[in-house]
Image: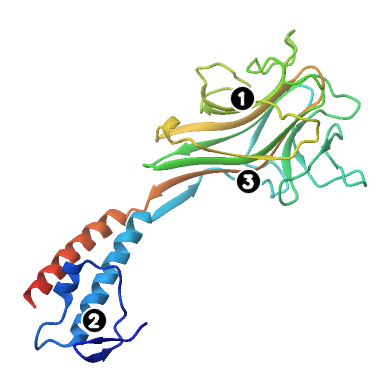
């Protein structure tokens, strides 16, 4: 709070800038009016302007997924599906004693969890029995209400130990096919789609297809997407992480999955209307002073 002079009298009314010259002229004390009344007017105007700024920024954020960090110590909230050997499993901080994290099935090197103690990872059943497989990790969600934004984010790595790069990207999630196929993908599916479907009629949007470049183990990459334009409200969908490997081991690691619907607070519109009315009343009263 700053002290300044109004009509030669010391006032503790805070200086409010910037305010238009017309507003200052309206709020300036008239002959016979006290400086304290001018302060009250300035306080009212400041409160009005502050509330009008805050109101449009008032939003509710609804988390649409559960256990996205896997810190429950299991895959609760998620559904897994597999064809052939292996599955999506719970990865931990288990290591080989030399600082290398190990996947739970094939004991392949990985970077472990992105944060916390757990993550989800696709893997074969054991180091001695890593046959061809296709694996999916899914969770359903329902988008209700008028969301202004639907935001998905996650951390992911893809380690392909085959060494030949991604193969037949976009191909069927079928490890028995004759075509060499090694890649991972992330999709938003219709709520009725089967877990390993690659039918274009089941996929609302594909967000990732391929694998990480470089020699594994690869570090996590952070991904984020605005899905608002792809997801009409009032329907149920599935977020899916999936991979297929019919050549050699491929690990798809996932952590910190978040899907958030951002909607305006129900009272925001009423607050704006009320503040507008208050502003009009204040202006009328000031003109009468």
Q: Between residue 232 and residue 52, name the one nearer to us.
A: 52
Circle 2 residue: 39
Label 3 or label 2, whichever lies nearer to me, is 2
Determine the secondary structure under disc 2: helix
Residue 157 occupies which quadrant of the picture? top right
Give the x, y percent position of residue 82: 71, 24
Circle 3 residue: 67
Give the x, y percent position of residue 163: 81, 22
Residue 70 occupies which quadrant of the picture? top right
Circle 1 residue: 195
Give the x, y percent position of residue 260: 50, 45
Rounded to the nearest angstrom, the CA distance separating label 2 from label 1 is: 66 Å
Left or right of 277? Residue 64 is right
Crowd tier of the residue under label 3, counting other residues whose Cα lies within 10 Å: few below 14, some 14–19, many 20 or above = some
Residue appearing at x 24%, y 73% in the figure: 44
Left or right of 257? Residue 133 is right
């Amino acid at each position: 709070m700053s002290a300044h002079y109004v009509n030669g009298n010391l006032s503790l009314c805070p200086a409010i800038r910037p305010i238009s010259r017309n507003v200052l002229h309206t709020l300036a004390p008239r002959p016979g009016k006290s400086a304290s009344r001018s302060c009250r007017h300035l306080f009212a105007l400041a409160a009005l302007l502050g509330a009008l700024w805050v109101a449009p920024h008032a939003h509710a954020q609804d988390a649409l997924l559960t256990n996205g960090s896997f810190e429950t110590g299991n895959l609760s909230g998620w559904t897994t599906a597999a064809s052939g050997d292996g599955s999506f499993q719970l990865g931990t901080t288990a290591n080989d004693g030399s600082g290398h994290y190990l996947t739970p099935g094939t004991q392949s090197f990985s970077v472990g969890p992105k944060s916390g103690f757990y993550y989800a990872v696709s893997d074969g059943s054991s180091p001695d029995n890593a046959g061809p497989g296709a694996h999916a990790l899914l969770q359903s969600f329902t988008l209700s209400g008028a969301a202004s934004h639907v935001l998905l984010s996650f951390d992911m790595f893809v380690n392909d130990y085959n060494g030949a790069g991604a193969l037949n990207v976009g191909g069927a999630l079928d490890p028995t096919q004759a075509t060499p196929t090694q890649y991972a993908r992330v999709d938003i599916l219709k709520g009725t789609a089967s877990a390993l479907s690659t039918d274009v009629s089941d996929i609302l949007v594909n967000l990732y297809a391929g694998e990480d470049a470089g020699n594994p183990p690869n570090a996590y990459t952070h991904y984020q997407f605005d899905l608002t334009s792809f997801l009409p409200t009032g329907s149920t969908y599935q977020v899916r992480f999936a991979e297929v490997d019919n050549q050699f081991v491929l690990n798809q690691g996932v952590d910190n999955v978040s899907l958030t619907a951002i909607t305006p607070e129900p009272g925001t519109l009423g607050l704006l209307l009320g503040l507008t009315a208050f502003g009009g009343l204040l202006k009328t009263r000031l003109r009468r002073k």
